[in-house]
Image (spheres, rainbow, N blue to C red):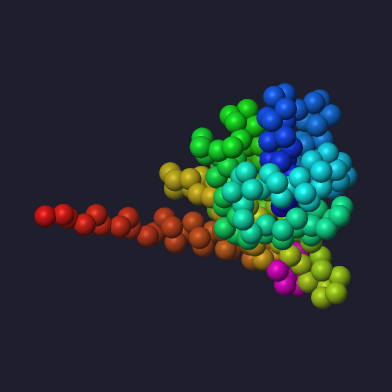
Amino acid sequence: MVKVDILATLLLRAQRERRPLTRWEASTAASMIQSSDNASANALWQRIGGGKGLTEANRTLGLTSTQAGPGPQWGLTQTTAADQLVLLSAVFDDHSPLNRASRDLIQSLMGEIDADQDWGVSAAGSRWQLKNGWLPRPHSQRWAINSVGRVKAHGSTFYLVILSHGSPSMSQGISAVEQAAQSAVHVLCSTPPPVSPIIR
């Protein structure tokens, strides 16, 4: 899931240098997001300056509780649901350190995920842009399964962040994440809007 943050960091660096992504950067970013290719993530992690580069970009993006993975281990980056909502806002909202071209690129890639990775928050809506993350924990034989993205359902747009750990298998973790996403959208759609107070 940190791959979206890696790409946002790369794009911020390119913006500061007043240049578009190189052809290699763009193709590597596409592979990293759409196919969740780890070799591509390794290469771009080095390009952004590793954890130091990610941390610097996160300060600009407004993420305050995300800790970059040590050394080359970007997959051990720790984050919070609140920080991931901030990142989604940076990716999708107009008021963002990322310019329009950068946001358009990330949104496009998140909307064209490989078919075998179309799970997670996409279960909650018919139109979506997402990035999933999964990691088996060798010491416990349990899985961390995460999904973040924007979905459209029932005429509304939702930013969803589902972080989980302790699943006995990847498939069970995916099922739990999808149920959580569907439940969240159902609750949000079922909740009536607050009544505005009458000021006399």
Residues in magenta, as a range = 165-171
Which residue shows up at 77% across the image and 30% down it?
26
| Quadrant of res 33 | top right
Whether residue 2 can be seen here: yes
- Extreme residue in the bottom direction: 140
At 82% across and 75% down in the image, what residue appears? 140
Whether 114 is drawn above or below 145: the answer is above
Could you say which is closer to the camera, residue 190 or residue 90?
Answer: 90
| In-image side of 115 versus 71 (left or right) | left
- Residue 116 visible in the picture: no
Residue for point 37% across, 60% down: 191
In the image, 144 versus 62, the foreground residue is: 62
For the C terminus, the quadrant is bottom left
Left or right of 31? Residue 103 is: left
Q: Is residue 95 left or right of residue 195?
A: right
Q: Residue at x 72, y 58 (%)?
A: 67
Please determine whether, in this image, residue 162 is positioned above or below residue 36.
below
Residue 197 in the figure: left or right of residue 169: left
Q: List x then y, in percent, for residue 107.
A: 63, 37
Corner quadrant of residue 79: bottom right
- Nearest to the observer: residue 101 or residue 113: 101
Q: Residue 45's x, y, as percent? A: 82, 45
Q: Position of residue 117 (x, y in %)?
A: 73, 49
Q: Position of residue 10 (x, y in %)?
A: 74, 37
